[in-house]
Image (cartoon, rainbow, N blue to C red):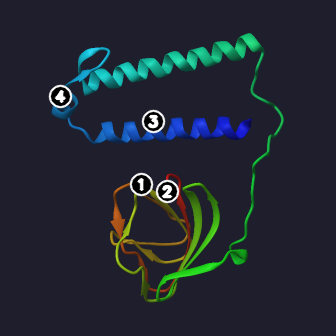
Amino acid sequence: MHGARDEILEQFWFLRRMNLSFLERLDERQRSRIGIHPQYGEMSIDSLATLLETHQAKHLRQIENIKLTLGVATSSEPWLDGVVSARAENASVRSPGDGVHVRTIWQNGIRRALQVEIDPGKQWPGLDYHVPGPEEVYIVSGDYDDGRGVFGQGTFLHHPAGSSHSPRSENGCVLLVYYPEG
């Protein structure tokens, strides 16, 4: 039961993030362009976004009313069904290039978490494209050069969907890399 609910919520949040990201990239002229909606007729992108926002707010109010009617409340007890743990040293290693080692430490559908090790002086082979979603990198140790700069231990980087790079490391690094959308 919780699995289906969690999947639906995850899809909702993914679509919402993608729509918001799309809208943020549009300028005022682009947002004012008119199209034809099959039910509402002529609409600008801005007016469609407002309609969607109102529509989603309506559904959230409906959910709150259903919870209230049924007496459903947020649990005060921990719920840990579905929690998994993994250790990188137990994962198989693949090497996409000389001096680059990748371990898949968790995967659920297209979402996955990797431990990536780049040996001193080595570089990811070719360009690493981030599609369909972003790449999120946490530097566990060492130095990591993504082409924009060199970052050290404890740094978090978000490379948005559609970006690409060919990371390297002068002294070697260990990374936790997460693909929330594949």
Q: Quadrant of the N terminus?
A: top right
Asked whether the residues under the numbered discs 2 and 3 touch, taking CB atoms below 8 Å apart as contact, a structural biologist would say no
Which residue lies at the image location 50% right of the left edge and 88% below the top edge?
99
- Percent across and percent down for residue 37 are 28, 21
Drawn side of residue 23 relative to residue 33, left or right: right
Q: Nearer the viewer, residue 3 or 28?
A: 3
The residue under label 4 is 33
- Quarter of the view holding residue 20: top left
Q: State the residue at coordinates (48%, 22%).
A: 56
Mark 1 belongs to which amino acid? Answer: Pro
Report the residue marked by disc 3: 16
Amino acid at pointer 4: Arg
Residue closest to the eye, 159 or 86 = 86
Q: Are marks 4 and 2 in contact (CB under 8 Å)?
A: no
Rendered view: 100 above or below 51: below
Q: Residues within 10 Å of mark 3 (few under 14, many from 20)?
A: some
Q: Nearer the viewer, mark 2 or mark 3?
A: 2
Q: Earlier in the sequence, mark 4 or mark 2?
A: 4
Residue 182 numbered tag: 2
Mark 1 and mark 2 lie on one chain; the one further toward the N terminus is 1
Name the residue type under label 2.
Answer: Gly
Disc 3 versus disc 1: distance between alpha carbons? 15 Å
Badge 2 marks a residue whose secondary structure is loop
In the picture, residue 80 is in which quadrant?
top right
Left or right, residue 18 beside residue 6? left
SS category of the residue bearing label 4: loop
Residue 132 has which mark?
Answer: 1
Q: For the residues marked 4 and 2, what is the alpha-carbon distance in whole angstroms? A: 31 Å
